Amino acid sequence: MKHGLIGVPLLAGMLAIGGCANMSSTEQRTLSGAAIGTGVGAVIGAATGEWAWAAGGAAIGAAGGYLYDQQRQREQRAYQQGVQAGKAKAPPAKQ
């Protein structure tokens, strides 16, 4: 019976991720992190008998997803700044 309970949080996470079409990248990555964290926490909770791991996993996963998104946004901004700087230094195109 314990093993059947593991699939419930994973299924819930997959269904939640499937509804991400109208979300921002920050919301998607935060929710995905929370779902993954919940799944990992549920597995650990099933092994130890302490289901609080699922809640802790969700919180840690959500924080990790948010931080990952912020890093990706910083990288994208730096890339765009480099592209704009390169365009500003490029010689005019010959016609």
Image (cartoon, rainbow, N blue to C red):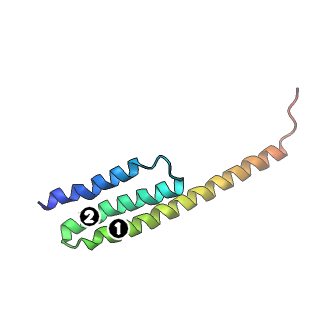
Spatial CA distance of label 2 from label 1 is 8 Å
> Residue at point 50% right, 63% down?
66
Q: Is residue 55 left or right of residue 87?
A: left
Q: Position of residue 32 (x, y in %)?
A: 41, 56
Residue 9 location (% of width, % of height): 27, 58
Residue 50 occupies quadrant: bottom left
What type is the residue that disc 2 sits on?
Answer: Ala
Instruction: Name the residue that disc number 1 marks.
Output: 57
Q: Secondary structure at mark 1?
A: helix
Label 2 neighbour load within 10 Å: few <14, some 14-19, many 20+: many
Q: Residues within 10 Å of mark 1 (few under 14, many from 20)?
A: many
Q: In the shown orientation, is residue 94 left or right of residue 58?
A: right
Q: Is residue 67 above or below residue 95?
A: below
**Image location of residue 25, percent across then percent down:** 53, 53
Residue 61, by quadrant, is bottom left
What secondary structure is found at the residue carrying circle 2? helix
Q: Residue placed at 23% from the left, 68% from the top?
A: 45
Are circles 2 and 1 on residues that touch, CB within 8 Å? yes
- Mark 2, residue position: 42
Residue 48 numbered tag: none
Q: Earlier in the sequence, mark 2 or mark 1?
A: 2
Q: Locate residue 1 relative to residue 85 in the image: left or right.
A: left
Judged from this view, the residue extending furthest toward the left is 1
Q: Nearer the viewer, residue 21 or 37?
A: 21
Image quadrant where one finds the C terminus: top right
Q: Is residue 35 above or below residue 52?
A: above
Q: Amino acid at mark 1?
A: Gly
